[in-house]
């Protein structure tokens, strides 16, 4: 049995699906008691759990062959909470822990990256058999704005027009997570999960144009106002993240991911091909 935390979120549910495809039993920990048909359809055991209460989570980890530890995004409690949960995993005798981190967690200009860096440090000293997955930004993160861009002909980019990102398909991240959860010979390894090509906003707009059959241009969505204060943690982190992307981009090499997968990483045009977006005629392609 493999435990996946934050299983109700996009990353967690994708990892559950990847494990289900391998015929593995999954216990998905979710943050509320509402039905999760998308998980039960994958034969997952769904359990409501508060990750900030490790004493209540610990019994749910007993007997687990592996734990995939995802902490909810932009949560100021990540360092303390994830470290406490790792200690609970050690007490519960979890045989293997995979921590879902981020590409370049040492980038201190982004506080939510730094939080993951501190968890990685705790993991290294925590007495567990561990692996770390470090994905870059997901291609899927743009999906919500693509329909509007296809309809209006404008793709607004909060990271500007000059710098690129190596967007990775979430399905590839989930497949890599499944490898780290199930295969031997990877303990103590930190593995980057990066898409196959650096993509700036104009290039993304051109790919979207080709997909929907109408001109789409990239527009710089310059942020307004000052950086939100640290007390508004999610907004504060998101703004600093896009400021970092605007200044430096967020790219890397796909070779580690492709070595884990044993195949090429999905390019962005392949990601686009799986989306239903308005075409030039106003209908789904």
Image (cartoon, rainbow, N blue to C red):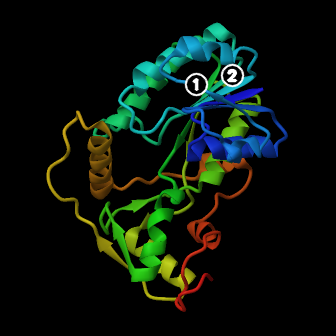
Residue at numbered disc 1: 49
Location of residue 187 by image quarter = top right
Farthest residue toward the top? 91
Asked if residue 205 shows in the view, the reply is no
Asked if residue 36 shows in the view, the reply is yes
* The C terminus, quarter of image: bottom right
Number of on-image labels:
2
Secondary structure beneath dot 2 equals loop
| 58 or 126, nearer to the observer | 58
From the viewer's perspective, tell me whether residue 12 is left or right of residue 153: right
Farthest residue toward the left? 226
Q: Position of residue 37 (x, y in %)?
A: 70, 46
Q: Which mark is residue 96?
A: 2
Location of residue 168 by image quarter = bottom right
Secondary structure beneath dot 1 equals loop
* The N terminus, quarter of image: top right
Identify whether 140 is placed above or below 256. Answer: below
């Amino acid at each position: 049995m493999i435990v996946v935390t934050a299983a109700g979120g996009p990353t967690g549910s994708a990892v559950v699906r990847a494990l289900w495809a391998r015929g593995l039993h999954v216990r998905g920990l979710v943050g509320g008691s509402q039905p999760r048909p998308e998980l039960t359809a994958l034969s997952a055991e769904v359990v409501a759990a508060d990750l900030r209460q490790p004493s209540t989570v610990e019994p749910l980890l007993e007997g687990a062959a592996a734990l995939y530890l995802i902490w909810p995004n932009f949560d100021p409690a990540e360092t303390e909470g994830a470290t406490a949960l790792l200690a609970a995993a050690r007490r519960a005798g979890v045989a293997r822990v995979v921590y879902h981190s981020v590409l370049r967690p040492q980038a201190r200009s982004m506080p939510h990256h730094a939080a993951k860096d501190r968890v990685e440090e705790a993991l290294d000293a925590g007495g567990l058999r561990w692996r770390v997955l470090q994905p870059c930004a997901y291609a899927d993160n743009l999906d919500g704005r693509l329909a509007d861009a296809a309809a209006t002909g404008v793709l607004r980019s909060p990271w500007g027009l000059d710098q690129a990102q190596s967007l990775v398909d979430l399905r590839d991240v989930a497949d890599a997570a499944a490898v780290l959860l199930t295969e031997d010979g990877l303990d103590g390894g930190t593995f980057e999960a990066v898409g196959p090509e650096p993509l700036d906003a104009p290039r993304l707009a051109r790919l979207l144009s080709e997909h929907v059959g109408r001109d789409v241009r990239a527009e710089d969505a310059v942020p307004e106002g000052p950086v939100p204060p640290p007390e508004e943690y999610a907004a504060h982190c998101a703004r600093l993240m896009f400021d970092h992307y605007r200044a430096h981009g967020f790219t890397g090499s796909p070779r580690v991911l492709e070595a884990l997968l044993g195949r090429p990483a999905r390019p962005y045009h392949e990601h686009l091909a799986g989306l239903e977006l308005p075409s030039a005629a106003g209908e789904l392609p």
